[in-house]
Image (cartoon, rainbow, N blue to C red):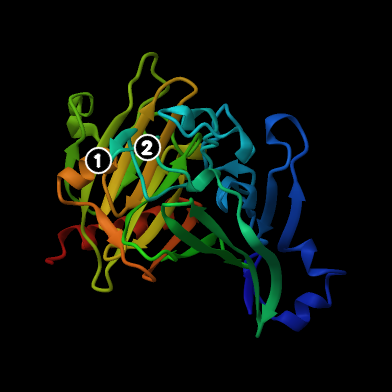
Amino acid sequence: MSILYGKKVMRKELLKRVGDISQIAGVRIYELTEGNEKGVEAVDIKTGTGFRFTVLPGRGLDISFAEYKGIPLSWISSCGEVAAPYYEPEGLGYLRSVHGGLLFTCGLTQVGMPCEDMGEKLGLHGRVSNIPAKNVHADSAWVADEYAMWVRGKVIETRVFGENVVLHREISAKMGESCLYVHDVIENRGFSKIPHMLLYHINGGYPVVDDGSLLLSPTKKAEPRDDEAKIRMDEYNKFYGPTHGFKERVYYHDMGCDKEGNVLTALVNKKFNGGEGFGFYVKYFKKELPCFIEWKMCGEREYVVGMEPANCRVAGRSEARKRGELEFLEPGEKREYHLELGVLPGKREILELEKKIKVMQWKRR
């Protein structure tokens, strides 16, 4: 059973009313054909509620555009959905191909600033988002009385005389819901211990981000990354209109969680549509992703806020090693990660989420 258009709908009754279920919800696979996006494989998923998003198998199975009833959720960079062969791994070259989108993944052995670690030069945020996926399967099907949609595949980051690590990813959704689920398994297929760094770069854009928008989070403590982030530190969770010359401000959050270990965060614009409000949330397990980074970028064109659950900070692998914070995967080891991203369509849903977050914030650990 699904809830569609304000009422409960049984499978049999729904199928009587459509020629094909794709009229309501489903999966569409295609390929981009122009410019430096040519050859990028893409999958559109729509859930029947007005929630629609695009997964890019050609770009590490990350999520690009997302919308709800025509309202965009994510920031899209000026680079667009650049094909993997144009990736520049050195230094800050990553910034010439980063698409932004609802989610791009950073890792799997390096996250953060370019650095040199153990004689290896590492570029910004690692390689995984610029590696096309293999063994991709995108489909939809009835599971009992629910209609499910998914994209599955694996992204392999490997080299001779180096790491051999695989991201097994499934992104799924259900008809009648305005949310999606990410389930990742990261596996060290090599015979040596390797560094393991992972960050989910979730990017909110206009109109979710606008003058007066807020980050809602169960923050126990927020720490500025640098002197720039100390500016108006008391407003770390508040966002302004596009500001000329604005420099990025990055904060490390210590998050509270509920008794199951869930963390909830959200970007909300309470002024949207005459005060009706709008936004989206992220849910994850603190045990899996103990770090959270906020990227506050209220510039012109680069107008975006990042909610970034991670297993590390963003100073780069060399610094993580120096601080004794670098995680590793043993030969054959696997780790699982789970995320849920969903729409907050109005003030009632925002208020309900705020109540849950306040409980998390003050819960004793």
Q: Please tell me which residue lies in front, 144 or 201.
A: 201
Instruction: Pick whichever of labels 2 and 1 is earlier in the sequence.
Output: 2
**Badge number at residue 303:** none
Q: Quadrant of the C terminus?
A: bottom left
Q: What residue is at 39 percent from the left and 14 percent from the top?
A: 244
Please give the residue where the numbered disc 1 appears in the rendered image.
Answer: 318
Q: Is residue 211 above or below residue 285?
A: above
| Residue 85 quadrant | top right
Q: Is residue 327 above or below residue 241?
A: below
Position of residue 249 measured from the top left corner of the image (x, y, whole percent): 29, 30
Position of residue 354 measured from the top left corner of the image (x, y, whole percent): 31, 55
- The local crowd at label 2, few if under 14, some if 14 to 19, many if 20 or more residues have their Cα within 10 Å, is many
Q: Amino acid at mark 1?
A: Ser
| Residue 29 quadrant | bottom right
Q: What residue is at 24 percent from the left and 40 percent from the top?
A: 318
- The local crowd at label 1, few if under 14, some if 14 to 19, many if 20 or more residues have their Cα within 10 Å, is some
Q: Please tell me which residue lies in front, 217 or 60.
A: 60
Please give the residue where the numbered disc 2 appears in the rendered image.
Answer: 122
Task: Give the residue at the far front of this rendering.
Answer: 161
Q: Amino acid at mark 2?
A: Leu
Q: What residue is at 16 percent from the left and 65 percent from the top?
A: 363
Q: Please tell me which residue lies in front, 7 or 66.
A: 66
Position of residue 342 measured from the top left corner of the image (x, y, whole percent): 49, 57
* 174 sits to left or right of 104: right
Q: CA distance from mark 2 to mark 1?
A: 9 Å
Instruction: Please say if the residues under marks 2 and 1 sit with CB atoms less than 8 Å apart.
Output: yes
* 191 sits to left or right of 226: right
Q: Is residue 254 visible?
A: yes
Position of residue 27 measured from the top left corner of the image (x, y, whole percent): 72, 61
- Circle 2 sits in a helix, a strand or a loop, which is it? strand
Q: Quadrant of the N terminus?
A: bottom right
Q: Is residue 237 visible?
A: no
